[in-house]
Image (spheres, rainbow, N blue to C red):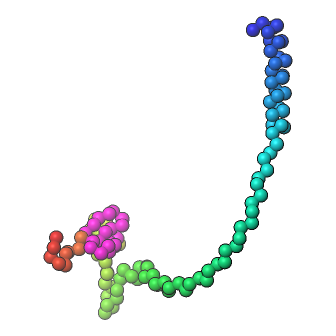
Amino acid sequence: MSKKEAKEAEPKKQAARKTEEKKPEETAPKEKPVEEAKPKVEKQEKEAKPEKKKKEEKGVFTLYKIEQEKCVRLRPTCERCGTGYFMADHGNRFTCGHCGFTRYKPAENGHV
């Protein structure tokens, strides 16, 4: 670009800047429509809720039972992890939470 062309381009750029500056001023912010008041709905009477079951207490004392001054373990220990890792009772199987070992309970009906 030559100096002559650059001088001619400057007024065009300035005019473009002015029009850009005017655009935000020309547009007025839109007002939000006023919401109409909604009729209040009467609350229905709450029915009495049935009583909740008490949850089974958790803790170390649920894993042991004391019989004749001896401590008896109620759940089997894991064969892989050793003593100290009890297996969880899942109805038809015992599962170790530490390593994932699973031992299935023997079938009562004789069906496999």
Q: In the figure, residue 38 lies in which quadrant?
A: bottom right
The residue shown at (25%, 69%) is 103
User: Where does residue 68 sit, x and y in percent of width and height?
Assistant: 31, 93
Span highlighted in magenta in the image:
85-103
User: Where does residue 104 sit, x and y in percent of width and height?
Assistant: 24, 70
Is residue 34 shown above or below 17? below
Q: In the figure, residue 99 lies in which quadrant?
A: bottom left
Question: Total number of numbered labels?
Answer: 0
Q: Is residue 83 visible?
A: no
Q: Does the magenta segment cover residue 9?
A: no
Front in this rendered view, residue 11 or 80: 11
The residue shown at (71%, 70%) is 39
| Left or right of 21 in this view: 84 | left
User: Where does residue 8 sit, x and y in percent of width and height?
Assistant: 82, 12
The residue shown at (82%, 42%) is 28
Q: In the figure, residue 81 lies in which quadrant?
A: bottom left
User: Where does residue 53 sit, x and y in percent of width and height?
Assistant: 46, 84
Front in this rendered view, residue 32 or 104: 32
| Left or right of 73 in this view: 24 | right
Front in this rendered view, residue 76 or 6: 6
